[in-house]
Amino acid sequence: GDQEPRRHARGAGPASAAFTIDTTLAAPIIATISDDTGYSSTDGITADNTLVLNGTATAGDTITVKLLGGAVLGTTEVEKGGEWTFDHTSSTLADGAYTFSTSASNGVGTSASSPPFAVKVDTNAPTVVSVNRQNPTVATSSVAGITFRVTLSESTIGVDSADFTPVFSGGLSGSISDLVQVGTNSFDVTLALSGEGTVRLDVNSGGTGIADIAGNLLSGVVIRHGHWHHQ
């Protein structure tokens, strides 16, 4: 007689492990990095490439630290006071931008992710790009003053008139009368002059206090200068 078609039951595979996002579990906060060097201690821009992350969460929770869109870096426990620290100093970060994120777990569920925390690592010191005659641009003039434009390689802080030295020869003398920042990384240095001779403007080779936003000091300066003859 007719035979019933065979029915093959599909075998069910093992169930995946449950992963619970517990919305009642407070998301941790990344508060600071150590050390956040430079202009601001809270801007996340630093010359330190071996970092410690600090934050807050519920006491007793386990904090998982990761790079946003990247690998898990490790875990740490929240102390009784609700503070946690994650020591990442064993890894040296290359210069660049990073975004860190964390989540908290208590053995039952896992919190939502913390707000992202942006960090920029910058270990490169600023340099002097050029010192050029700005006004007048000609090599010889009889005007009573000259402005040199000093251009650095990046935005800096701590620039003042004491960072520059005018060097005179012949019967020319004078002094710095004005310093004006032009754009993000250029400065116009004006000299008031008397007499006749030549002048150049040097950027001092040390002790200037000039630094970039991350706190890298102007170092290894190659002194650049513009010569000018006053008659």
Image (tube, helix red, strand yellow):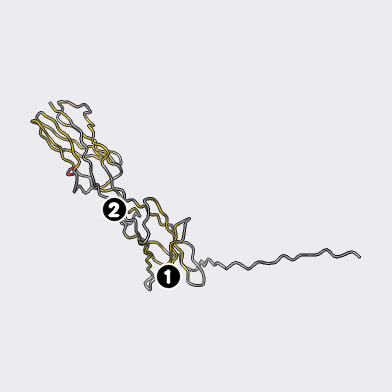
Q: In screen coordinates, is 50 left or right of 138?
A: right
Would you call the spot at circle 1 few (<14 residues within 10 Å), some (14-19), or many (20 or more)? many
Residue 48: % across, % down: 32, 56
Image quadrant of residue 197? top left
Where is mark 1, residue-wise?
Answer: 58
Residue drawn 36% across the image and 57% down it = 92
Q: In screen coordinates, is 193 left or right of 54?
A: left
Quadrant of the rendering where the C terminus is positioned: top left
- For the residue marked with disc 1, what is the amino acid? Thr
Residue drawn 57% across the image and 68% down it = 18
Residue drawn 76% across the image and 65% down it = 8
Label 1 sits on a secondary structure element that is: loop
Above or below: residue 191 compared with residue 97: above
Above or below: residue 200 compared with residue 84: above
The residue lying toward the viewer, choosing from 146 and 127, is 127
- For the residue marked with disc 2, what is the amino acid? Gly
**Mark in the foreground, 1 or 2:** 2
Residue 224: % across, % down: 22, 37
Q: Earlier in the sequence, mark 1 or mark 2?
A: 2
Label 2 sits on a secondary structure element that is: loop
Quadrant of the rendering where the N terminus is positioned: bottom right
Residue 24: % across, % down: 50, 68
Q: CA distance from mark 1 to mark 2?
A: 31 Å
